[in-house]
Image: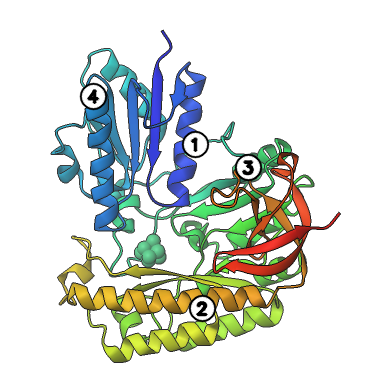
Amino acid sequence: MIKKAAFYTLGCKVNQYETEAVIDIFLDNGYQIVDFSEMADVYIVNSCTVTNEAARKTRQIARRAKRRSPDSLVAIVGCYTQAFPDEVSEIEEIDFVMGSNNKAEILDKAEEMLAGRDVDAEIKEYKELRDYEELNLKRLSNTTRANVKIEDGCNQFCSYCIIPYARGPVRSRKKEDVVAEIRKLSQQGVKEIILTGTHLGAYGSENGNSKALTELMQSLTEIESLKRVRLSSIEGTEIDQGMMDLIAEEDIFCPHLHLPLQSGSDQILDAMQRPYTAGEFKETVAELRKRIPDLALTTDVIVGFPGETEETFAQTVEAVKEIGFAKVHVFPYSAREGTPAAEMDQLNGNIVTEYSKKLRLINEALMLDYQKEFLGEKREVLIEEVRDHQTDLLTGYTDNYLKVLVDGPDELKNELVEVRLEESFDSHHILGKIID
Ligand code: SF4
């Protein structure tokens, strides 16, 4: 009988990439992949630990799987297990755990367990995660875009962040391997590639090459079949002149950068151990805008960090408005045990919620403002494979990350089409019309 496996991914694009690669391994070994809500022999939860909420959800998803299918094998792998192995091991419903590395061995461990043998948890200390684990994408469930992982780990240790403890130090994938994978994916019809990493801008830094990402981007310009490349998230301090030139001059690079600001207050940025001041961040933005006029800038902001006051929050609001982000992801600060910030005096939760609400409202207005700049223009839109569930219209993204709704036939899915951007539908969508 064909064995069935189901996967659930929490967290970032790196996790999504790794799950896709592990699914490939299961498919190659004769498994059928089913939806996580169906009965399966093996359930794999690729976990996230970036917030307490992500960890709670990981536990909940795994428990539900076991309740639904008590004879199945349930495993939690990834960041949560790596950072808090004891906490995860205490979950009764779990059959085995694995850390951030050795994802290629998940199938072997599952097979061992299904054969009735015990497996060791084998979670290495994060500092020992020294080698980049090469995983490859062979086939994709969605060919509109693919996350391609090029780097793992982070050495920055921002004071609030658990990721360096969950992912270990920076390890970069060989440029030739990245280029080969992207060439293959684009030849298979994938239109958009998102370069991802735990700390993308640190790509190659363990070998002392601060220009490695720019060099990789340069190599990608030689792949003729490649249509669009986006960077997932990068620190402003890591963008060099060569990278700016590539984004400005080469059509395949989307004029969209996600630069995490985190706070507009120098005092808070310092406590967060972030490597820039608010002024330096604004200078980088000014330079980028000069070079790439249509640039969509999106960002992350953490509100309610220990030490946040009315004054520091007001500085953040001012910075966010002044920069005029296309979108702000607002994260209410959540203390992660084991990080320096968890030892600091914490704010009352109600204040954190109030700040989050205020900033989210400001974000709505900024998103609408950004949309307005492009109404009436023609823009190329990459049509998604799934229609919008509310309107049943086709959806797609412009290169500068505007989400567009258009009327059209299913044949346009996964195609790049010319669209006139007509009016705002809401802060997240523009109504557009396909130009014949
Ligand atoms: S750069 Fe900072 S926020 Fe980003 S992964 Fe590293 S420690 Fe975490």
Tell me if 112 is positioned left or right of 176 in this view. Answer: left
Which disc is residue 20 wearing? 1
Which tag is nearer the camera, tag 2 or tag 1? 2
Give the residue type at disc 2.
Answer: Ala
Q: CA distance from mark 3 to mark 2?
A: 29 Å
Which disc is residue 385 wearing? 3
Q: CA distance from mark 1 to mark 4?
A: 23 Å
For disc 2, the marked residue is: 365
- Position above or below: 37 against 79: above
Outermost residue, front direction?
391
Most foreground residue, 340 or 386: 386
Q: Quadrant of residue 261?
A: bottom left
Element at label 4: loop
Residue 158 lies, in percent from the top left, at 33, 69
Residue 47 lies, in percent from the top left, at 32, 44
Residue 130 lies, in percent from the top left, at 38, 47
Dot 4 or dot 2, earlier in sequence: 4
Asked if one can make out residue 7 in the rendered structure from this viewpoint, the answer is yes
Regarding ligand 1, which quadrant of the image does it lie in? Answer: bottom left
Dot 1 or dot 3, earlier in sequence: 1
Dot 2 or dot 1, earlier in sequence: 1
